[in-house]
Amino acid sequence: MKRILLFFMAAAALCGCSKNDPTDKPEVEKPDVDKPAEQVRIPITLSTDIWTKATDSGYESGDKVGIYTVNNVNGAAGTLADTGNHLDNTKFTFDGSAWNPDTPVYWKDETTPADFYCYYPYMQTVSDVTAVPFSVKADQSTLENYKASELLWGKKEGAKPSTDPVNISTRHAMSNLLIYVKPGTGYTEETLAAEGISVKVTGLKTSAKLDLATGKVTAEGASADMIPYKENSYWRALVVPQDVVGTELIKVTVGDREYTLVQTVSFQSNKQHKCTVVIKRIGEGVNIGIEGWETDDTDYGETLE
């Protein structure tokens, strides 16, 4: 019996010694191949270097834009919807050098491209992305009201996830009417100014709907009189794109006389239209000569890459 007990004690001792054998290799924990890799979250940021607006000097600190982001699906562009997009009317605010969302936003993943839709000014509620309502100010005689009549739109297609800013260029959704009043025969700049000049734009609709998917603007509502903004030697007004045919478009008052310009014009988004009105004094009266419309082909809203 003692021999059997000693045998088991010896065996136990040998087992204990084998655990401390220096030739034994420690067990290495195998990776869990079924455990998904941790996803890297890439923040979405916007570029600021090519944005321009009504003041022709770019965005100003405190300006806000709305951003929609639509992810590609199976390698094809997705469709912008009222809701359910990757980003739905997310507000970005300009601080003078960068655009910042109220809370951080991220790409879907590291590989899925997306389309970005941008508009200015930001509206808290957008119920229909194909018909966003907007109106220009009827009285644009102040710089504040003139700037408040600016509507901008831009789109960036197929942007790929990156830590670099998404470079979006916005274009003017409205048209810009420039009116110059020049002295003709019998007047000089000084004597014409001494008579007193006022300008009014008439017969144009001031309300519109913007399709965020395409940037198309559709005029709607009744026509109204507009007071343009006087800047240096000319007047300017932001106008809803629309076609006018044989319309009483501009009224110029010199002293106590009012003169009406009837014109046919196709106002287009992102286009400036120039009208020079020449005032001539004939005898005791005053005649108005009109130079033709000139379309400035410069794209003041920049171009998307």
Image (cartoon, grey):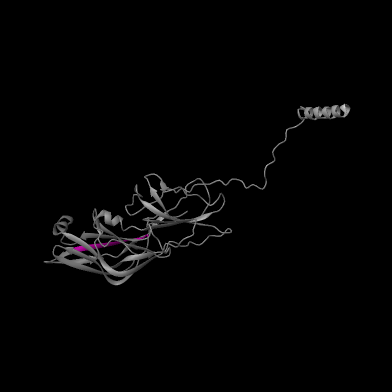
Q: Position of residue 279 (x, y in %)?
A: 19, 63
Q: Decide which of 287, 269 is in the foreground and name it.
A: 269
Residue located farthest toward the front when viewing the structure as drawn: 1
- In magenta segment, residue 272: yes
Q: Position of residue 264 (x, y in %)?
A: 31, 70
- In magenta segment, residue 63: no
Q: Position of residue 75 (x, y in %)?
A: 58, 58
Q: Decide which of 134, 273 is in the foreground and name it.
A: 134
Q: Decide which of 90, 270 is in the foreground and name it.
A: 90
Residue located farthest toward the bottom when viewing the structure as drawn: 246
Q: Is residue 278 visible?
A: yes
Q: Decide which of 118, 57 is in the foreground and name it.
A: 118
Seen at 22% across and 68% down, the residue is 260
Left or right, 109 with reference to 154: right
Left or right, 27 with reference to 181: right
Left or right, 39 with reference to 154: right
Q: Position of residue 16 (x, y in %)?
A: 78, 29
Secondary structure mostly seen in the magenta stretch = strand
Q: Is residue 20 above or below residue 196?
A: above
Q: Is residue 10 above or below residue 117?
A: above
Q: Is residue 116 visible?
A: no
Q: Based on the displayed image, in which of its 4 quarters is residue 287 positioned? A: bottom left
Which contiguous range is marked in magenta? 270-279
Q: Number of labelled discs?
A: 0
* Quadrant of the drawing holding the N terminus: top right
